[in-house]
Amino acid sequence: VKANVVQLVRQLRPHDVLSLVLFSDRAEVFLPPMRVADISRLESQISMVQCGGATEIFRGLEAGYSLLTRYGDSRANRHLVLLTDGHTYGDEAPALNLAERAAQENIATSALGIGSEWNDVFLDRLTSFSGCLLYTSPSPRDRTRSRMPSSA
């Protein structure tokens, strides 16, 4: 997962703004919104992330959405990227509702499916509101695109 995040960060431009929210059964803003000026510093911070706990996707989406609506410029491209195995516990409906509301506010939601048994049905539904790409990613080297945006 960390290698995938680093790959995504390396594709950003210095004037782009990045924030990182970690989630399990709660959500934590690990990196507050900041410009992507010092990639090596960001990579170092990402390497310190520790995994653990259960997965409640809604908590992570809610924290990311809150950051994008509070700090994001509504004229800018606002994009919430979810890295997960897609397995969540009892919060599918609120997560889908939030992804739909985000799309209505021009906030795109993408998902990067991690592992070999990620929940493609749920993640495909979650990302369908904004027509964003859905990727599978057993490892960073094996990333493959599984759905094109509806606007392509």
Image (cartoon, rainbow, N blue to C red):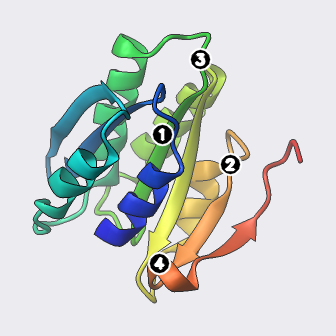
Marks 4 and 2, the one that precedes in the sequence: 2
The label nearer to you, 3 versus 1, is: 3
Q: Nearer the viewer, residue 150 or 36?
A: 36
Question: Could you tell me how far apart the alpha carbons at marks 4 and 1 are, in whole angstroms?
Answer: 19 Å
Numbered circle sitting on residue 132: 2
Residue at image coords 45%, 89%: 116
Q: Is residue 147 above or below residue 37?
A: below
Image coordinates of residue 102 in percent, x first then y, are 54, 28
Count of marks placed on residues: 4
Question: Dots 4 and 1: beta carbons under 8 Å?
Answer: no
Q: Which residue is mark 4?
A: 140
As helix, strand or loop, the secondary structure at mark 3 comes to loop
Image disc number at residue 76:
3
Residue in view at x 42 percent, y 50 percent: 9
**Distance CA(mark 3)–CA(mark 1):** 13 Å
Q: Secondary structure at mark 4?
A: helix
